[in-house]
Amino acid sequence: MANREVVIGAVRTLEEVGARARVFVSMPVVKGITSRALSDHPASETAPTREPFRRLQGIFGMDEGGISYIDHAPLYGDACFEGILIRNGIIFLYREHIDRLWRSAAGLKIEIPYSKRELSWQVVRTIQAVGFKKSESGYIRLVVTRGLGDLGINPKKCVGATVYAIVSTIRLYPREAYQKGIELGLSRKIRRPGGSILDPRVKSNNYLNNVLGLLEGTNNLELFEAIMLTDDGNIAEATVDNIFCVIKEKGYRTRPSKVKLLTPVGDYCLNGITRASIMTFARRFGYRVEEVPDLMPIDLLGSNRECFMTGTGCGIMPIVKVCGSQVGDGSPGEVTKRLLREIERAMANPRYGLSSSATKAELRKYIGRKHSPIQL
Ligand SMILES: Cc1ncc(COP(=O)(O)O)c(C=O)c1O
């Protein structure tokens, strides 16, 4: 059984989240199926979509409303999602996230019943309902599911997508973790499948493989993340983060081209938005960046090396040990720290996202923009 203290801590954390979080929920109305807590709620309104059934939408507390037991997300993991960070009053790289959500839904052949602008407006309204202080970090979990269907897997028997966005405060890794770096475990048995099994470009809700990889890779260890390998034994990614290796050749302090960043090719990893940001920043600094198919755990070690992982939740996290073996001198390297400072700067720069207090007009202008500050 799980450690009692840990479980009680988890309950407290959830209670904190529940006290602040607000959820935008949108789902079809099917008599006898759609929760009455949702349809009878004063915050429910008819959604202005063109579907051949009535759809309800509204912004609720975490303990109100609720998606259906027969939604195909809880039944089959048939859904896609985005995790998005709010920092300094900016929804960081929001358009890049909403564009990826649309690509994921298209990959799963799920039709989103809103335009990007309509859905984003509901996200902004939900953020405003939480009422963040400017100094607070927030997190958005935006989910699009296959929706209500019978108990078989057939998507053709489903009614229409359920869409929801949880907006809450977030507990990031402690500051100390960024200063000292963390250790990564390694999942040896559970591997990251390639595109013929689960297309890594689709950010789906099917994470069971990653959950098992995390359990295996951190088994009995006080670790938070683990590397997953491809079938060939090369690094694919971590369970919710991308991996980078830094190689510093002699003279790198005066010649940035002597710094090389290696990261696995996109065939076995999510094409992470933080990964793309880091590649953009690194190239701007004059570092060489290569996506390689055969990066191995042993390549992360060595005295002239650094390692870090990237993801929306952690930003850039220095890795100082892999499975008990030291990376570099066992402390976060200078290249990693420089990139860490750069992403912190970007998170405070309005050019890198959407204002969390955007008006409808500002939102329209933002969503309509074509160029991205990062190379995707
Ligand atoms: C499997 C996996 N890889 C990588 C990432 C990092 O991607 P991003 O930087 O877009 O958050 C995530 C984030 O959720 C993930 O789940």
Image (cartoon, grey):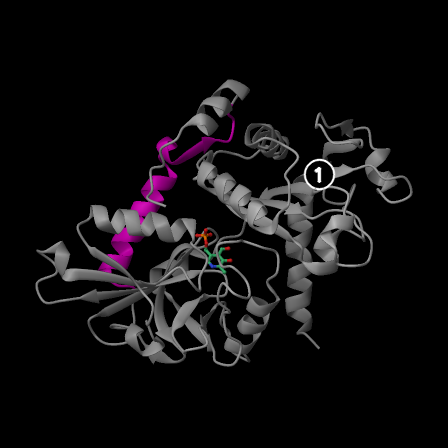
Q: Which image quadrant: the N terminus?
A: bottom right
Res 34 visible: yes
The quarter holding residue 176 reads bottom left
Q: Residue at image x 82%, y 28%?
A: 42
Image height check: is 349 above or below 202? above
Q: Position of residue 340 (x, y in %)?
A: 32, 52
Q: Position of residue 150 (x, y in %)?
A: 82, 53
Pointer 1 residue: 25
Q: Check if residue 9 falls in the magenta segment.
A: no
Q: Position of residue 273 (x, y in %)?
A: 42, 49
Q: Check if residue 345 falls in the magenta segment.
A: yes
Q: Is residue 31 shown left or right of residue 72?
A: right
Magenta region: 332-358
* Mark 1 residue's CB less than 8 Å from ligand 1: no
Q: Is residue 80 shown left or right of residue 296?
A: right
- How many labels were placed on the picture? 1
Magenta stretch prevailing secondary structure: helix
Q: Is residue 233 shown left or right of residue 119?
A: left
The residue sitting at the front extreme is 156
The residue sitting at the right extreme is 32
Image height check: is 337 above or below 109? below
